Image (spheres, helix red, strand yellow):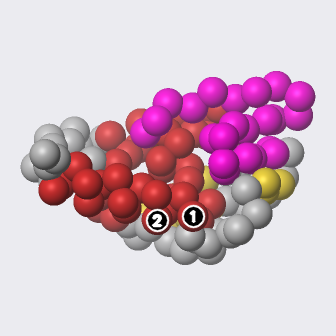
Amino acid sequence: PFDLSELSARVAAVARRYSGNPNPHIQLGELRINLSDRTILRGDARVELTSREWTLFETFIQRPGALFSKSQLEERLYELGAEIESNTIEVYISHLRKKLGFHIVDTIRGMGYRLGAT
């Protein structure tokens, strides 16, 4: 006995983890990222991200030049039917910038966000 939506979400999560870059180690400016164990080092210091911050950051890493609209990012963070505050994405982007560097995410006014130039 299992819930089909739970199964679907788990399959999608596994597919996201194993799609794209087969090398789990990524160097992004001063950041060293290990996708397999979900760790980030900024210089010698480990950076702790919440699960939603990680999901958002991973979204940008998987498609480095891609521009994501606010609604696309909301879909990645929340299940259908979840109530989302109007500034939720902005708050998480702000958290990422504070933890990883202000250059990590570029805002394209009126269009969305993308991984910043490092």
Helix, strand or loop at label 1? It is helix
| Residue 36: percent from left, percent from top | 66, 48
Q: Nearer the viewer, residue 11 or 30?
A: 11
Q: Looking at the image, is 48 positioned above or below residue 35?
A: above
Looking at the image, the residue that sits furthest to the front is 1
Q: What stretch is highlighted in magenta?
A: 31-52
Q: Which amino acid does label 2 sit on?
A: Ala
Q: In this view, does 97 lie above or below 18?
A: above
In the image, what residue type sits under mark 1? Answer: Tyr
Residue 15, label in figure = 2
Quarter of the image where the C terminus is located:
bottom right
Distance in Å between CA atoms under marks 1 and 2: 5 Å
Dot 2 lies on which element? helix
- Disc 1 and disc 2 in contact, CB within 8 angstroms: yes
80 sits left or right of 76 in the view? left
Residue 50 belongs to the span the image colors magenta:
yes
Percent across and percent down for residue 73 are 37, 57
Query: Residue at (41%, 43%) from the top-left corner?
Result: 90
Relative horizontal placement of residue 6, taking residue 26 as reference (left or right): left
Label number found at residue 18: 1
Q: In which quarter of the image is residue 32?
A: top right
The answer to whether residue 28 of the structure is visible from this angle is: no
**Residue 95 in the image, given as x and y percentages of width and height:** 53, 33
Q: Which of 37 and 61 is in front in this view?
A: 37
